[in-house]
Image (cartoon, grey):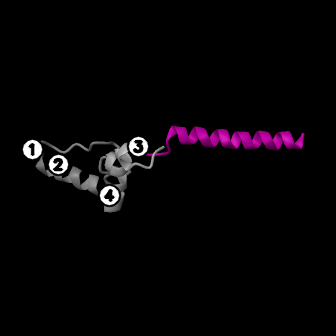
Amino acid sequence: MTANPSACPATVTSMAAIRQGIDPVRARVAASQHLTNDQILQAVEAARHAADGPYQPPIARRSGPHPGDVLYWVTCVGGACLLLIEATI
């Protein structure tokens, strides 16, 4: 290691950016903007009014629980029952 700042220009640059208030990590990372459900619905409504043809909803919602949720709860209840049976024997 050396005390000469010209030996490591990346450190000097990042320290200068920190002094200016720029976050060096956020400057390197790029992410897309997250949309809220309300913003998505507004965009769908705007697309519906702009379309010439009949409106078709993009996603049909399924009624009832997801099959994975049912399987999870059945295995949890079954495991609890097996533990109770084992404890009584």
Instruction: Place residue 18 in its image quadrant.
Output: bottom left
Q: So how many labels did they put on this image?
A: 4
Q: Is residue 73 magenta?
A: yes
Residue 22's disc is 4
Left or right of 10, for residue 87: right
Q: Which callout, 1 or 2, points at the residue further toward the start of the chain?
A: 2
Q: Secondary structure at mark 3?
A: loop
Mark 1–mark 2 Cα distance, whole angstroms, equals 10 Å
Residue highlighted by disc 3: 62
Numbered tag placed on residue 52 in the rendering: 1
Q: Amino acid at mark 1?
A: Asp
Mark 1 or 4, closer to the camera? 4
Q: Is residue 23 magenta?
A: no
Which label's residue is closer to the chain start, 4 or 2? 4
**Amino acid bearing label 2:** Ala
Q: Label 4 sits on what residue type? A: Ile
Where residue 86 appears, as percent x and y from the top left, is: 84, 39
The image quadrant of residue 9 is: top left
Residue that badge 2 annotates = 47
Chain-order first, disc 4 or disc 3: 4
**Magenta region: which residues?**
61-89
Real-space Cα separation, disc 3 to disc 1, in angstroms: 27 Å
Q: Callout 2: few (<14), some (14-19), or many (20+) C-alpha neighbours within 10 Å? A: few
Is residue 29 visible in the rendered structure shown here? no
- Tell whether label 3 touches label 2 (CB within 8 Å): no
At x 57% / y 41%, what residue is drawn? 70
Specify whether 39 is left or right of 50.
Answer: right
